[in-house]
């Protein structure tokens, strides 16, 4: 029995799945599709630890205190420079230096002029005194950095008295610079005092007031 060719065409078109226009046939690669790339692992970036306001305040006070205490080292260093200048015959000096060493150096130079045969001995003794004084000043600086507050204050008092020596001889610039140095030292001293009270508050919240010595355990009784 024969069957028209049109029936076969209709059956093949009805039974076979139709491929949508614009899409590749099943099993074939799509040339317009981008190749798949593997996902890169996420890199974890460590974040810097957050600094609390209390830690920031402590850091600021500590830095301010060290700057004030560091003035003792500067005074000692420039005093030795002044001594070397004066003992070798120079006629100038730095106003940041000490007046007591400068007076001794000037006296040694004048005595050496009157006694040329003993000039080396006189200048050597003067410079030995200068080294001793500079060492004492550096000791005050070291103790001030270690936050020994009574010795910090004593060093400022001695520097104040040294400034009065310049005032007696009319050295206004040296007096003014001594005053500025004392102001910087006092700022550092006050910063250490505030830091001590703050540490006392952290260690003993029930007794926030008072002076705290960091080298001794706090009395929490």
Image: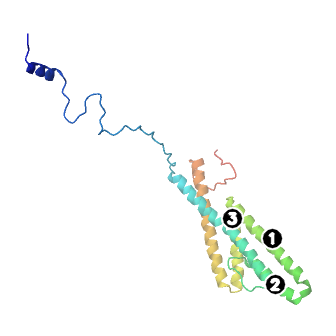
Asked if residue 156 is positioned above or below residue 163 in the image, the reply reads above
Q: Residue at x 62, y 68 (%)?
A: 186
The mark nearer the N terminus, 3 or 2, is 2
Position of 197 relative to 42 (above/below): below
Q: Secondary structure at mark 1?
A: helix
Residue 29 falls left or right of residue 39: left
Image disc number at residue 132: 1
Q: Which mark is residue 107?
A: 2
Residue 79 visible in image: yes
Q: Are marks 1 and 2 in contact (CB under 8 Å)?
A: no
Q: Is residue 121 above or below residue 11?
A: below
Q: Is residue 209 visible?
A: no
Sequence-wise first label, 3 or 1? 1
Q: Which mark is residue 194?
A: none
Asked if residue 125 lies left or right of residue 40, the reply is right
Is 92 drawn above or below residue 217 in the view shown? below
**Mark-to-mark CA distance, 1 and 2:** 17 Å
Task: Tell me, yes or no, whether the two marked residues, 3 and 2, touch with CB atoms within 8 Å.
Answer: no
- In three-dimensional space, the C-alpha distance between marks 3 and 1, rounded to whole angstroms, equals 19 Å
Percent coordinates x, y for residue 188 in the rendering:
62, 65
Q: Earlier in the sequence, mark 1 or mark 2?
A: 2
Work out which residue is located at the far right of the displayed protein and give it: 117
Q: Residue lying furthest top in this view? A: 1
Q: Residues within 10 Å of mark 2 (few under 14, many from 20)?
A: some
Q: Which residue is at 59% across, 63% downward?
A: 64
Name the residue that disc number 3 marks. Answer: 152
Number of numbered discs visible in the structure rendering: 3
Q: Position of residue 69 (x, y in %)?
A: 66, 65
Q: Is 35 left or right of 105, judged from the image as shown? A: left
Question: Which of the image's four quarters has the N terminus?
Answer: top left
């Amino acid at each position: 029995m024969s069957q028209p060719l049109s029936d076969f065409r209709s059956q093949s078109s009805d039974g076979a799945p139709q491929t949508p226009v614009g899409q590749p046939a099943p099993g074939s690669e799509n040339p317009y599709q981008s190749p798949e790339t593997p996902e890169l692992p996420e890199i974890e970036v460590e974040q810097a630890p957050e600094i609390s306001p209390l830690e920031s305040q402590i850091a600021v006070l500590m830095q301010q205190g060290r700057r004030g205490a560091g003035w003792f080292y500067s005074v000692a260093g420039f005093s030795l420079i002044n001594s070397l200048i004066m003992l070798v015959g120079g006629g100038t000096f730095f106003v940041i230096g000490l007046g007591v060493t400068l007076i001794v150096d000037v006296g040694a130079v004048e005595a050496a002029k009157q006694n040329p045969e003993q000039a080396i001995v006189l200048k050597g003794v003067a410079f030995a005194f200068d080294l001793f004084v500079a060492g004492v000043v550096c000791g005050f600086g070291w103790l001030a950095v270690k936050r020994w507050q009574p010795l910090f204050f004593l060093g400022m008092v001695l520097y104040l008295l040294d400034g009065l020596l310049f005032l007696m001889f009319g050295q206004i610039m040296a007096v003014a610079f001594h005053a500025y140095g004392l102001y910087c030292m006092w700022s550092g001293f006050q910063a250490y005092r505030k830091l001590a009270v703050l540490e006392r508050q952290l260690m003993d919240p029930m007794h926030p007031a008072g002076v705290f010595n960091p080298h001794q355990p706090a009395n929490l009784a």
